[in-house]
Amino acid sequence: MFAPMCTTCGTEFPPAETPPADCPICVDDRQYVNPHGQSWTSLDRLAQSHRNSFRQEEAGLIGIGVEPHFAIGQRALLVCTPAGNVLWDCVSLIDDATRTIIDALGGLHAIAISHPHYYSAMVTWSEAFGGVPIHLHEDDRQWVVRPSDRIDYWSGGTKELLPGLVAIRTGGHFAGGTVLHWADGAEGKGALLVGDILQVTPDRRHVSFMRSYPNYIPLSPAVVERIVSRMAPFSYDRIYGAFWDKIIACDARQAVESSASRYVDAVTGNGPADAEP
């Protein structure tokens, strides 16, 4: 018996004698199946070749990522507050060193995840810290491949995880797609932790929006406008995306609003016209 882990998306399945035929998260059109076929590893095997790296993004915020690159390659964010620490998004590797470091920072109060591509080893992470709750929006319940009584399927538009930490259901990339508002982030100006519900672009001055990033499937203008409107009540000056260095350091609200307008203009044919041949 071992807990199979998909090598393409990094999701851990329940312990079994043999892995399933395929990974439903990768079969979905927002992800992809490895062209060489479905393959599996396990946490024990991953720990033999990989480790977690840590980076302080700002005071009270620690990035955690698996090295070398594994699966999708996202990094998680540990938000440290006076009321407790919350892990935003998750990675596939949890080891003794990671537990030691997080315990030294005050332990873990809860886990919250933006969408199913980053569920990874969330149940094992929870168990490693005494069974802390895992907060997922109920609209994405169908994508949970390893059920646990530690999972809190919350409903509605927002959920306060701790004072100053509010999960916001935006939808978009997934029906239950969620971002996290951290009121004390960006030196008190507010920060959004967005996974790739909003994808920070390479210039770090814009974001974009997609149903599927690997398959280049866009969202409709109405959905993009709804995402932005659901974040509008919250003050924020900085955005942390899903990957190392995908950060809009300042003026993030303006960046989101201008990016949404640019996106809507482009997909409705109202953007700059290409030069005629």
Image: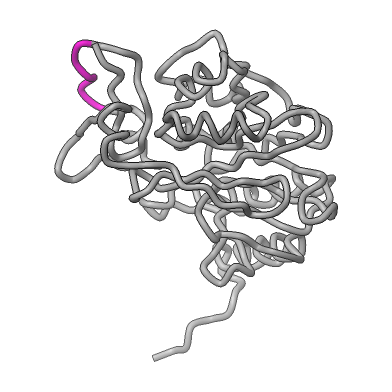
Residue 274 vertical position relative to residue 219 in the rendered view, above or below? below
Tell me which residue sits at (28%, 37%) in the image: 7
Q: Quadrant of residue 106?
A: top right
Q: Position of residue 267 (x, y in %)?
A: 55, 63
| Residue 137 showing in the rendered view | no
- Would residue 103 be found to the left or right of residue 148 on screen? right
Q: Quadrant of residue 30?
A: top left
Tell me which residue sits at (59%, 42%) in the image: 77
| Residue 210 showing in the rendered view | yes
Q: Position of residue 103 (x, y in %)?
A: 60, 28
- Front-lying residue, 101 or 168: 101
Screen quadrant of the N terminus: top left
In the rendered structure, does residue 14 fall within the stretch colored magenta? no
- Secondary structure predominantly adopted by residues drawn in magenta: loop
Q: Position of residue 266 (x, y in %)?
A: 56, 68
- Front-lying residue, 127 or 11: 127
Screen quadrant of the C terminus: bottom left
Name, please, the residue furthest toward the bottom: 277
Q: Position of residue 17 (x, y in %)?
A: 20, 11
Q: Which residues are magenta?
A: 17-22
Tell me which residue sits at (69%, 64%) in the image: 249
- Front-lying residue, 207 or 29: 207
Residue 275 vertical position relative to residue 149 in the rendered view, above or below? below
Residue 226 vertical position relative to residue 276 in the rendered view, above or below? above
Name, please, the residue furthest toward the top: 149
- Would residue 259 be found to the left or right of residue 41 on screen? right
Name, please, the residue furthest toward the left: 36
Tell me which residue sits at (52%, 47%) in the image: 54
- Front-lying residue, 84 or 97: 97
Way the structure is coloured: one colour
